[in-house]
Image (cartoon, rainbow, N blue to C red):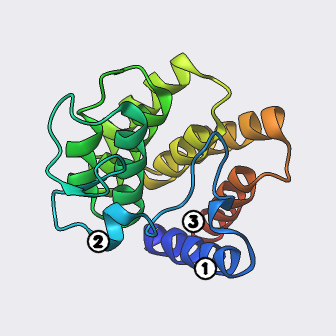
Amino acid sequence: MRRRLVIAATTVFLGVSFMSAPVFAMGGSGDSSGGSSKTVQKCKKNQVWDKQKKKCVDPKQGMLDDESIFEAGRDLAYAGRYDEAINVLTMAANKEDPRILNFLGYAHRKSGRVNVGLGYYQEALRIDPNYTLVREYLGEAYLQIGDMAKAKNQLAEIEKRKGKGCAEFRVLSVQIEAASKAG
């Protein structure tokens, strides 16, 4: 029941946010919330958009640069195509890119493998402790497993790094508030 309320509150909040804000409002460091990429719009399942070839291709190790892999994986994850996102993201050459690790965590967590997601988030933060989008998603994972104290700790870390005005703080604080009311 608590999880449904958190998801419902997040859906309402995100729906309102996306109607009134640019699509890229969910986090910095080049992250944008997805669903609008050519990978998601035009490509068949298990294909990604190749910018250089300007067409959908079957992804293969070493075929795409890490930036394209990140973008395709992120967009697939945001579109709810988690297993495809994982398959694409694991092809990155740089296994220590915190953005790649973050979205591997996101896709695993959203697929129900919360503990696997936690590991990816923690590794991303080991590399870049200031990456607040990871902290938001880590806080969401803690809420999923019922650890309010750790979720609030991530909220405090986001506030310390970016303040209360950033999207990551707003999203996580709404979810924590909804979980508090549900519990």
Quadrant location of residue 167? bottom right
Q: Amino acid at mark 2?
A: Lys
Q: Please tell me whether residue 38 is drawn above or below residue 166 in the rendered image.
A: below
Dot label at residue 68: none
Residue 114 place in picture, x, y as percent: 33, 46
Foreground: 182 or 134? Answer: 134
Marked residue nearer the N-terminal end (3 or 2): 2
| Amino acid residing under circle 1 | Gly
Classify mark 2: residues with Cα within 10 Å, few (<14), some (14-19) or many (20+). Answer: some
Report how far apart the C-alphas of labels 3 and 2 lie in the structure: 42 Å
Q: Nearer the viewer, mark 3 or mark 2?
A: 2
Q: Nearer the viewer, residue 177 or 69?
A: 69
* Residue annotated with mark 2: 42
Q: Which mark is residue 15?
A: 1
Write down the residue under mark 3: 183
Q: Nearer the viewer, residue 28 or 155?
A: 28
Amino acid type, residue under disc 3 in the picture = Gly
Q: Is residue 168 left or right of residue 104?
A: right
Is residue 10 left or right of 1 when viewed as pictured? right
Dot 2 or dot 1, earlier in sequence: 1
Q: Position of residue 49 (x, y in %)?
A: 30, 55
**Residue at 42% across, 48% down:** 71
Res 112 visible: no
The residue lying at 79 percent from left, 32 percent from top is 161
- Residue at 58% x, 70% y: name it: 10
State the separation of the CA atoms marked 1 and 3. 24 Å
Instruction: Determine whether the residue tagged by mark 3 lies in a helix, strand or loop.
Output: loop
Residue 111: name its quadrant.
Answer: bottom left
Find numbered disc 1 in the image and state the secondary structure of the residue it sits on: helix
Q: Earlier in the sequence, mark 1 or mark 3?
A: 1
Where disc 2 sits, the SS reads helix
